[in-house]
Image (spheres, rainbow, N blue to C red):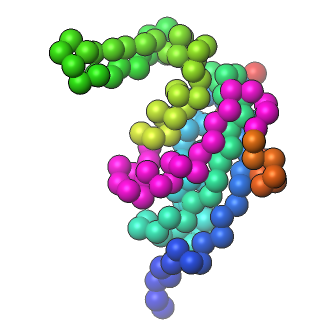
């Protein structure tokens, strides 16, 4: 029996819609990453982009468990002397919640040109309105919501 290797011409891409209301950031990021990479498909091949498109709505209603909202920080360096910057996740989630999800998903994708291509298929919106209605995304439910 031969091992099946998918070709990029064999891939049929679908659109998925995820509502992030009351979902922990990490669980949502892993679910999104699995869809973007195509790991849930039977034709998954590591070196071929077999993933689908993902639209995430209500990113401002995501939650962080435990004391992460107070203690966790996003740290980066500008490249200049003394250019170390940091922002707390409490402020980040209020002002720019899509960026928090983007950072989490990007960290879980491969650090190659394949990962960068997969990341372009992610669309995140703060509210319930999104621009991908014409693609008729299929709504899926991610387990792990907090009530």
Check the image and name the residue furthest to the front. Answer: 80
Of residues 41 and 124, the one drawn nearer to the viewer in this rendering: 124
Q: Is 48 left or right of 59, judged from the image as shown?
A: left
| x, y percent for residue 65 | 57, 20
- Where is 4 relative to 13, above or below? below
Residue at the image point whose x is 21% and y is 19% from the top: 80
Q: Which residues are magenta?
A: 108-130
Q: Residue at x 49, y 8 (%)?
A: 70
Residue 1: where, in percent of width, then height? 48, 91
The x and y percentages for residue 19 are 74, 36
Identity of the residue drawn at 52% across and 27% down: 100
User: In this image, 16 relative to 4: left or right?
Assistant: right
**Residue 119, above or below 88:** below
- Is 120 in the magenta? yes
In this rendering, would 143 be left or right of 10?
Answer: right
Extreme residue toward the left, this view: 81
Of 46 and 123, which appears nearest the observer?
Answer: 123
Instruction: Please determine whether, in this image, residue 21 is positioned above or below residue 42.
Output: above
* Quarter in which the C terminus is drawn: top right
Q: Residue 10, percent across and down?
A: 59, 78
Q: Quadrant of residue 27?
A: top right
Q: Residue furthest bottom?
A: 1
Tell me the quarter of the picture where residue 93 sits.
Answer: top right
Number of marks in the rendered image: 0
User: Quick check: can you spot residue 137?
Assistant: yes
Q: Residue at x 61, y 13 (%)?
A: 94
């Amino acid at each position: 029996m031969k091992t099946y290797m998918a070709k990029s011409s064999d891939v049929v891409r679908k659109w998925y819609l995820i509502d992030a209301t009351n979902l922990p950031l990490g669980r949502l990021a892993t679910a999104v990453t699995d869809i973007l990479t195509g790991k849930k498909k039977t034709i998954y091949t590591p070196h071929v982009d077999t993933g689908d498109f993902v639209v995430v709505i209500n990113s401002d209603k995501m939650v962080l468990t435990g004391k992460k909202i107070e203690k966790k920080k996003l740290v980066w360096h500008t490249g200049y002397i003394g250019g170390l910057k940091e922002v707390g996740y409490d402020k980040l989630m209020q002002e720019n919640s899509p960026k928090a999800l983007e950072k989490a998903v990007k960290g879980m994708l491969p650090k190659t040109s394949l990962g960068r291509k997969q990341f372009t298929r992610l669309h995140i919106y703060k509210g319930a309105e999104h621009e991908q209605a014409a693609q008729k995304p299929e709504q899926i439910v991610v387990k792990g919501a907090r009530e």
